[in-house]
Amino acid sequence: MNTDTIIIKQFIQEHGKEAAQALETIEPDKLATFFNDTPVELLLEVIPLINPHLMSTVFELMQKKKVVQLFESLEIHYTVLSIRMMNEGLAEKINSQLSSERSTYIRRLLKYPENSVGSYVEPAVLNLTEKMTVKEALEEAKRYKKKIYPILYVLTPDRKLAGAINLSDLITQHPEREIRSIMKTKVITIPPETPVQSILYHQGWTDYFALPVVDQSSIFMGVISLETIRSILAKSDRRLEKPGQTAISALGELYKIGLASLIRSATDFKPGTSKE
């Protein structure tokens, strides 16, 4: 690894936002060449900060093996947005090489229009069944390894939303009581086709951190959180900015030469990028 490359990677690691702004000024083919030679762990820090429209082009020019590695680990909604903007045939080929769980999740989100609630729903949510007892529900919550929201959703055997219960209320109930006897059956829900921007000021956020997403057949798809909504809209505003329009912070040698110039220099003498 030459000195320029070491400096570049150090800057990306320590100044992610400024690095992303500089990277957006680089030609996609040079960026693809550089990314092919950059560790995945480092790319996962900076790619989410780069304009996804630009990154979709860069992904098309990168080695497919590297793109698959990135799509397995990148934040799921950034991955879906990138896939939407890529060449359809190439996107399908890459998606088919992902793990079965990841690929299925992506296909489900792609069914809905961009910037709709359905394209950002979080399906991995702890849910309970109507016939569970309080004791069984609490044991299920203890076993669950992912994020648990304060509200737990109760589903029928065919995954229709039957009701909801607050986790704090569940703890105070008799262990042998059935969930269906204490759950609330009137639950605020969001259709998956709803535009994300239209629910920023939804009345449900007054009482809940997340709201359940339910399709026309009352099938529970997962939840959409207020945190996710705000993040999506903030990133949308970021994508409207002209790439590279913000000044880049200085750091030693990079202040004089510029990160973009270093990367161009580092990739000038490399052969064309292989997509295989």
Image (cartoon, helix red, strand yellow):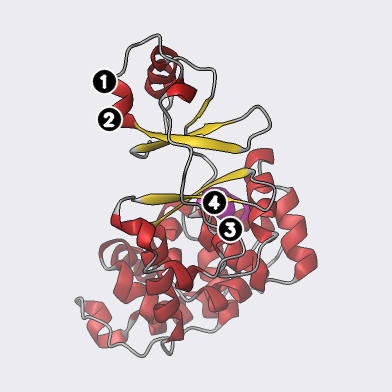
Mark 2 sits on what residue? Answer: 168
Q: Is residue 197 above or below residue 214?
A: below
232 relative to 98 in the view: left or right: left
Q: How many neighbours does mark 3 have within 10 angstroms: few (below 14), some (14-19), or many (20 or more)?
A: some
Under tag 2, what secondary structure? helix
Q: What residue is at 31 percent from the left and 18 percent from the top?
A: 173
Q: What residue is at 36 percent from the left and 66 percent from the top?
A: 230
Amino acid at the residue labelled 3: Pro
Q: How many neighbours does mark 4 have within 10 angstroms: few (below 14), some (14-19), or many (20 or more)?
A: many
Q: Is residue 177 above or below residue 224?
A: above
Mark 1 sits on what residue? Answer: 172
Residue nearest the observer in this picture, 118 or 12: 118
Q: Spot the residue most to the top.
A: 176
Marks 4 and 2 sit apart, C-alpha to C-alpha, by 22 Å
Q: What residue is at 74 percent from the left and 72 percent from the top?
A: 87
Mark 4 sits on what residue? Answer: 213
Marks 3 and 1 sit apart, C-alpha to C-alpha, by 32 Å
Amino acid at the residue labelled 2: Ser
Q: Do the residues labelled 4 and 3 touch (CB within 8 Å)?
A: yes
Residue 273 visible? The answer is: no
Q: Which of marks 3 and 1 is nearer the N terminus?
A: 1
Q: Which of marks 2 and 3 is nearer the N terminus?
A: 2
Marks 1 and 2 sit apart, C-alpha to C-alpha, by 7 Å
For the C terminus, the image quarter is: bottom right
Q: Do the residues labelled 1 and 2 touch (CB within 8 Å)?
A: yes
Task: Point out the stretch of residues depicted in magenta.
Answer: 68-73
Mark 3 sits on what residue? Answer: 191
